[in-house]
Image (spheres, rainbow, N blue to C red):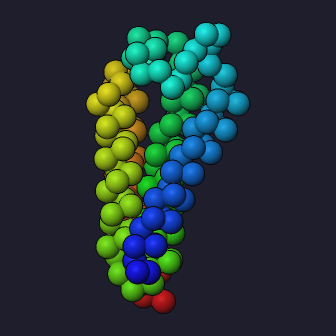
């Protein structure tokens, strides 16, 4: 039961981290153009060139941090197994790659988003393993 709870709370922590960095920080520091609808996939697909670079960088950072924090929190709660961390990490990687596939992006954005999400998984794995050895 503890591992199920670790997975759920780890995923919530990861999602919250992504939301905070993308929406609260990114959108406040780098406002979208007038008439933008960030919840509309059609608008996003057709207007990626109008989105400020700063928001795109915040998205990359958010995906990296989200994977890392989610895996760490899952391991901290589980205390005995890596499975919750792996589940959270894989769900967050899947969400990141779904985002990459669904929205046309510049090459730098696609490569950095995917690369940093994978790096977040690797670092999250290392940090999670250290939590289990304590």
Q: Is residue 106 visible?
A: no
The quadrant in which the N terminus is found is: bottom left
Quarter of the figure with residue 129? bottom left
> On the rendered structure, is 58 left or right of 70?
right
Question: Would you place residue 127 above or below residue 88 in this image?
Answer: below
The residue at the point 42 percent across, 22 percent down is 41
Name the outermost residue toward the bottom.
Answer: 134
Q: Nearer the viewer, residue 56 or 43?
A: 43
Name the residue at the right extreme: 28
Q: Residue at position x 58%, y 28% from top?
A: 54
Q: In x, y percent, where is residue 69?
A: 51, 61
The residue depicted at 31 percent of the width and 56 percent of the height is 90
Q: Is residue 109 visible?
A: yes
Position in image of residue 109 (x %, y %): 40, 30
Determine which quarter of the picture holds residue 20. Answer: top right
Answer left or right for 65 relative to 46. right
Q: State whether residue 64 is above or below residue 36.
A: below
The percent coordinates of residue 81 (x first, y second) are 35, 81
User: Number of marks in the image?
Assistant: 0
Q: Is residue 3 above or below residue 85?
A: below
Residue at 57% across / 38% down in the picture? 22
């Amino acid at each position: 039961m503890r591992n199920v709870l670790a997975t759920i709370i780890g995923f919530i922590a990861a999602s919250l981290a992504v939301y905070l960095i993308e929406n609260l920080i990114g959108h406040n520091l780098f406002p979208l153009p007038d008439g933008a609808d960030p919840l509309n996939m059609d608008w996003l697909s057709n207007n990626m060139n109008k989105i400020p670079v700063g928001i795109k960088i915040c998205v990359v950072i958010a995906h990296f941090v989200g994977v890392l924090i989610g895996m760490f929190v899952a391991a901290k709660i589980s205390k005995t197994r890596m499975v919750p961390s792996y589940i959270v990490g894989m769900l967050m990687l899947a969400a990141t790659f779904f985002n990459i596939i669904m929205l046309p992006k510049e090459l730098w954005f696609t490569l950095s988003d995917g690369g940093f999400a994978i790096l977040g998984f690797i670092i999250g794995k290392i940090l999670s393993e250290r939590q289990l050895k304590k």
